[in-house]
Image (tube, helix red, strand yellow):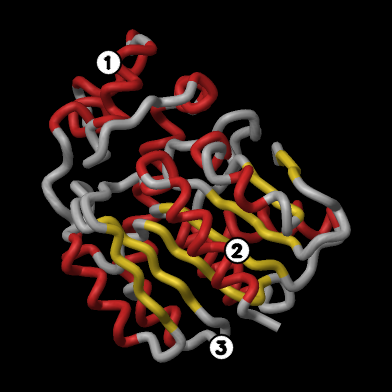
């Protein structure tokens, strides 16, 4: 798997996991605030960005691949922050390998299938057949940027490496990943899964998230060890829309853990 590392190698490890169809580049604006005090490890999930495709995109299988990458780096007892459906992979990682995860930060991670909002029109067109594969094949950088901006509530300048990473991820892979993430939520909601873990959880949600009903963040109140932070006027991509706030929240939560 493709891995990017920032910060001192001897510092406490902080693992960043992206969402469906995305890449490690989505974390770029937040990294400078984190790398001073942490060994920051960003991973491209299987089939995304510069990581090769996988035979299975089931959530536990993705978590196993992340665990193998961390084992290869000698990482243990890490803080893990994940965006969107990357939160499902992070939860599966904490479930299967509790030795690797000391705390979780979940950003814009939808708690259940009944929390899904009507998706932005351009995003629906890019992801749904029969038009999706055709648009995917001819999408320009400008179209990719419009798709990213459609999920935001605040004005954002979409970095070039975010665009490049999205263009490197294939349509079929993205569809398969989304199907597996839906299956994971259908089996059990994320709050139900998290309630069975012993790690502390920070949940960050934007009050104007267009992909998930922002009020669904209340479902995480059922998790005894969870703390909830709602960012006013922020959409689905807090790392791009409010990187300073997100960085401060992740750091504060990580530093509170022994």
Point out the tag, 1 or 3, that comes first from the N-terminus.
1
Quadrant where the C terminus sits is: bottom right
Residue 158, image x, y percentages: 40, 26
User: Quick check: marks 2 and 1 in contact, CB under 8 Å?
Assistant: no
Residue at x 60% of width, y 73% of height? 94
Quadrant where the N terminus sits is: top right
Mark 1 element type: helix
Residue at x 55% of width, y 34% of height? 25
Point out the tag, 2 or 1, that comes first from the N-terminus.
2
Residue 198 is tagged as 3
Residue 4, image x, y percentages: 71, 39
Residue holding disc 2: 80
Position of 163 relative to 198 (above/below): above
Packing grade of label 3 (10 A; few <14, some 14-19, many >=20) is some
The nearer-to-camera label among 2 and 1 is 2
Residue at x 17% of width, y 59% of height? 213
Q: CA distance from mark 1 to mark 3?
A: 44 Å
Residue 223, image x, y percentages: 38, 85
């Amino acid at each position: 798997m493709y891995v990017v590392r920032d910060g001192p190698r001897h510092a406490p490890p902080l693992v960043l996991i992206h969402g469906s169809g995305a890449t490690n580049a989505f974390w770029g604006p937040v990294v400078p605030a984190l790398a001073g005090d942490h060994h920051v490890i960003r991973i491209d999930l299987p089939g995304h960005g510069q990581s090769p495709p996988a035979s299975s995109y089931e959530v536990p299988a993705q978590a196993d691949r992340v665990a193998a990458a961390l084992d290869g780096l000698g990482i243990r007892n890490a803080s893990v922050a994940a965006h969107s459906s990357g939160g499902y992979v992070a939860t599966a990682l904490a479930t299967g390998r509790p030795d690797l995860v000391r705390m979780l930060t979940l950003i814009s991670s939808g708690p259940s299938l009944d929390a899904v909002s009507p998706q932005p029109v351009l995003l629906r067109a890019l992801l749904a057949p029969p038009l999706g594969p055709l648009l995917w094949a001819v999408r320009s950088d400008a179209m990719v940027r419009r798709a990213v901006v459609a999920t935001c509530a605040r004005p954002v300048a979409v970095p070039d490496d975010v665009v490049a990473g999205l263009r490197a991820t294939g349509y079929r892979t993205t569809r398969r990943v989304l199907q597996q993430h839906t299956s994971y939520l259908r089996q059990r909601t994320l709050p139900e899964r998290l309630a069975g873990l012993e790690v502390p959880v920070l949940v960050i949600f934007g009050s104007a998230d267009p992909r998930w009903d922002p009020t669904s963040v209340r479902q995480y109140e059922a998790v005894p060890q969870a703390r909830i932070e709602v960012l006013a006027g922020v959409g689905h991509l807090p790392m791009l829309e409010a990187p300073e706030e997100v960085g401060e929240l992740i750091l504060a939560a990580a530093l509170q853990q022994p």
